[in-house]
Amino acid sequence: MKQVSLSTPLIEEKQVPEFSYEEYPEALELARESVILLKNRENILPLENVGSILVTGPNADDIYSQLGDYTPPVREYTVTTVYQGIHKQYPDAEILFAKGSDLTETTEEMLLEAEEKTEKCDVSIVVLGSSSSRFTEADFDDNGAARLSEHLYMDCGEGMDRSDLNVPEAQLELFRTVRAKSRKVVTVVIAGRPMILNEVEKESDALLLSFYPGPCGGQAIAEIIRGIVNPPGRLPVSLPRANGQLPVYYNYKSSYLAMHYLDEGHTPLFYFGYGLDYTEYIYTEIRLIQSEITTEQLQKTGVELQFKVKNTGDREGFCVPQLYITDLQTSVARRVRELKGYTKIRLKAGEEKEIGIRIAFDEPALYNCNINKQKGCQEKGDI
């Protein structure tokens, strides 16, 4: 047998470059574009001319709550938390901090500190949610899955399935404590899964949702609260009103009425694709290039919806038009609506643009009884 020297590895080890905002500016831009504004009562956001702010909550100043499962260790100075971001955006304001609660536990002392500091501030920013942090006191199996233990420091990720999607009671205790004493409450939810936000949505003056925004998440969220950035995010999922309402989705089949309950609303709390921002848009001259088209033409060119969109507000923003279809005549039951295209357009205040969203040949196609969508099954009818 021939001996082989292993002194030189086949793959050379290379020094992994350290993350920095300068080297990876995409991290900040992705964080900015992923934050979703769900509520903005009386246009409380953006926050301007604020003298004092309380930042509180288990995810307010925790770097790993902004990062996903199996995140490697990171240097603290490479991550900006919400608390740090608020400090940067409001250099002349008094910024107070009180953690208020852990993910699933709190104490009278933690709540009392939050209550006392709430009374001293003009606005409270409450940062709730979940965490996939593997750098607290969680235990793990050999395969990397987290083990359940008496005290949860990680409540999302592999091995952390939940039967209840409500915000943990400890966090709700903090939220209620702050709400009872605060003039204005801005709630930020940083999470790795959809959560039931009924009470939080009802009692908050403004509500932002961010699904693990990454190392620049705190900066992006603070910029949006300040109004430096107009939030362009839209929901990638529907948010349920209750556990019993699951599954919640926008595109149920037309053969039945989904989410129909005697004791609950017939819609999600927020639909897939929903999201607000700080300006308004109007759509005009909406038209199909071809209102009738043959299968051959559809296969060759597709079909395009054209329209004009105008930013009628006083701020620059991202408009996100979404194109859904409903097939009115078909041999099989289809979805009540199906997302087939969208785009994102940056518009300055007062600016108007003409936009087109094209549907390709296979977008309206369906599986019929012969299961032949791969061959392009297009049926005659109205869509």
Image (tube, rainbow, N blue to C red):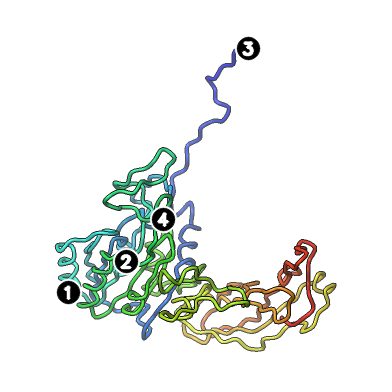
Q: Amino acid at mark 2?
A: Val
| Comparing labels 3 and 4, the label whose residue is closer to the camera | 4
Taking the spot 22% from the left edge, 70% from the top edge, the residue there is: 94
- Is disc 4 placed on a helix, strand or loop? loop
- Is disc 1 placed on a helix, strand or loop? loop
Which mark is first along the chain, 4 or 1?
1
Q: Label 1 to label 3, Cα distance in Å?
A: 78 Å
- Is disc 2 placed on a helix, strand or loop? strand
Marks 1 and 2: CB-CB under 8 Å? no
Which mark is first along the chain, 2 or 1?
1
Q: Label 1 to label 2, Cα distance in Å?
A: 18 Å
Which mark is first along the chain, 4 or 3?
3
Q: Residues within 10 Å of mark 1 (few under 14, many from 20)?
A: some
Q: Which residue is mark 1?
A: 120
| Comparing labels 2 and 4, the label whose residue is closer to the camera | 4
72 to the left or right of 94: right
Task: Give the vertical position of 30 relative to 302 (above or below).
Answer: above
| Comparing labels 1 and 2, the label whose residue is closer to the camera | 2
Marks 1 and 4: CB-CB under 8 Å? no
Which mark is first along the chain, 4 or 2?
2
Q: Which residue is mark 2?
A: 127
Q: Residues within 10 Å of mark 3 (few under 14, many from 20)?
A: few
62 to the left or right of 19: left
Query: In which quadrant is the C terminus drawn?
Result: bottom right
- Residue 98 occupies which quadrant of the picture? bottom left
